[in-house]
Image (cartoon, grey):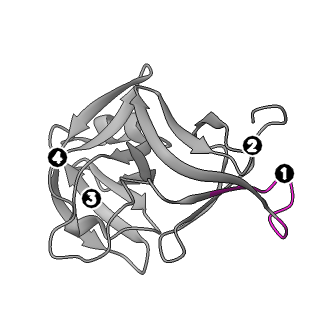
Amino acid sequence: MLRIGKILKSHGTDGGLLVSAPEVELEQITGPVYVEFDALPAPFFIDDCVARGSSRYVVHITGVNALKDAEEMVGRDILFDGSFEDSDESLPEDFIGWTVKDAGGSASSPRIVGVVEDYEPIPGNFCLYVRTPAGEQVMIPFHEDFVVSVDPSSRELILDLPSGLY
């Protein structure tokens, strides 16, 4: 699952949520979105979604019908593992063939780690199998804290990886 947005605050008294989602158009999402509670992703369906600017939305999701329920959601990430309707752009679910680069603390000159050969969607720890230029295969955790940028057009993942990981 990939992080697609963040719940910023409640909106109104009917369970509305103000959500920031700069990389996707939430109204195109089909299927469930997930919000983590106690480290477990809970599925929710978007009942209503109204754009409020270029990357913010007022969203109503199934089961969140009151201000109290909405307040419990504030500050949580919205995760997604599915497809978009009527869109050529989608979240990159299959990173095979993408180049992984390590920013090493400096996004201006990232160095090549290798090319993604496979991935393993371990719950809570999505991992990429990367073939290094030396021919070794290494497992890299694809955690949101490591992501500097994801560029679908150039098929590059720039990560800020801990030293000694590869």
Residues at marks 4 and 3, CA–CA distance in whole angstroms? 10 Å
Disc 4: which residue:
45
Label 3 sits on residue: 59
Numbered label attached to residue 38: none
Mark 2, mark 3: which one is toward the viewer? 2
Disc 1: which residue: 104
Discs 1, 2 touching: Cβ within 8 Å = yes
Residue type pointed to by label 3? Val
- Magenta span of residues: 100-109
Question: For mark 2, what is the residue?
Answer: 161
Sequence-first disc among 3 and 1: 3
Where is residue 112? Give x, y as percent. 74, 58
Q: Earlier in the sequence, mark 1 or mark 4?
A: 4
| Nearer to us in this view, 93 or 58 | 93
Among the two numbered marks 2 and 3 on one chain, the one whose residue lies closer to the N terminus = 3
Numbered disc in front, either 3 or 1: 1
Q: Amino acid at mark 4?
A: Phe
Give, as a three-letter code, the residue at label 1.
Gly
